[in-house]
Image: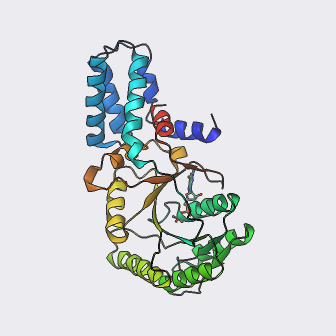
Amino acid sequence: KASWFSRLKSGLARTGSSISSLFVGVKVDEDLFEELETALIMADSGVEATQSLLTKLRARVKKERIEDASEVKKALHQLLTEHLQVLEKRFVLDQDKTNVVMIAGVNGAGKTTSIGKLAYHFQESGASVLLAAGDTFRAAAREQLMAWGARNNVQVISQDGGDPAAVAFDAVNAGRARKTNVVMVDTAGRLPTQTHLMEELKKIRRVIAKADNSAPHEVLLVIDGNTGQNALAQIRAFDAVLGLTGLVVTKLDGTAKGGTLAAVAAGSQGVRPIPVYWIGVGESLHDLQPFVASEFAAALLG
Ligand code: GDP
């Protein structure tokens, strides 16, 4: 398997010992189920998803009279894959229009890095890309994006200390005028508790729609894979304000909390199971992968 998969796997397996090791040389009994339950909770899967998976696993083991621990592992992989399937969705660009993608998240989640990776990916697939430097608060953020754009031949629309909604508006108009395939609108990092900044996101969205009433076509939330259960609150808050169409989950190459996605899939704490279009598995431009439920389940189980 590719190296990103082993990075994902070793990241997700950091719960002390990998879940996979629990199946080695043991009897299929209540102890095993309890250890699995603990391991899934430790990986931040949440009580709801964990209970649901374990109930199904116990039932299947009983029904199929499974006596071999390695068969239990296969059954759990299957159940986890089915459970995560609701989050699997391919990100597709409409060839006939300028696809406007708005990107939000808390500071340090990996927005700028993910935008760089996505721009690279879209360009590799033959699409033209324009970026809007919507983080007008931090000059450094704007400069980072401009420098990145210059290195990779991607044009960046920015404004000195301007209004982020105006930058987004200009970028969408410019993208449409030039028939650019994708316009990605970066936004400054913010916390769900910063009410005025959350209101500002709404405004950016509204102003984008003034440039193109069908836009934004995608609204992505970037989440740090290390966030754990708090990711659910982030998803809920940003979704309420923006109406998210997808998630990008970063830093899965170095986290033990990958189970969080099982909680998202279960709709825990009132989240909608929003599709995970992409996962970040490293810091380089290539380290972005589509989310595939069966692969993710395999990595989580180690
Ligand atoms: P922003 O504030 O949301 O724009 O976050 P940045 O894009 O600046 O990322 C914050 C830090 O996380 C940087 O050091 C990135 O290199 C790092 N980072 C982002 N995505 C990944 C990832 O998938 N894996 C790893 N290991 N690091 C990442």
Camera-nearest residue between 1 and 11: 1
- In the figure, residue 21 lies in which quadrant? top left
At 34% across and 28% down in the image, what residue appears?
A: 36
Front residue of 154/252: it is: 154
Is residue 250 among the parts visible in the rendering? no
Q: Is residue 43 left or right of residue 183?
A: left
Where is 33 relative to 221, above or below?
above
> x and y percent of residue 159 in the render?
59, 86
Return the x and y of residue 197 as percentages of the image width and height: 38, 77
- Say left or right for 226 vs 31: right
Image coords of residue 72 (percent x, y): 38, 21
For the point 48% across and 44% down, the residue is 255
Q: Residue at x 57, y 76 (%)?
A: 133
Which residue is at 37% across, 70% downward? 242
Picture coordinates of residue 277, whole percent (x, y): 49, 54
Q: Is residue 61 above or below residue 156?
A: above
Ligand 1 shows up in which quadrant of the image?
bottom right
Point out the image quarter for the N terminus.
top right
Is residue 67 positioned above or below 293 on the image? Answer: above
Of all residues shown, which one is farthest toward the front?
Answer: 96
Front-lying residue, 127 or 14: 127
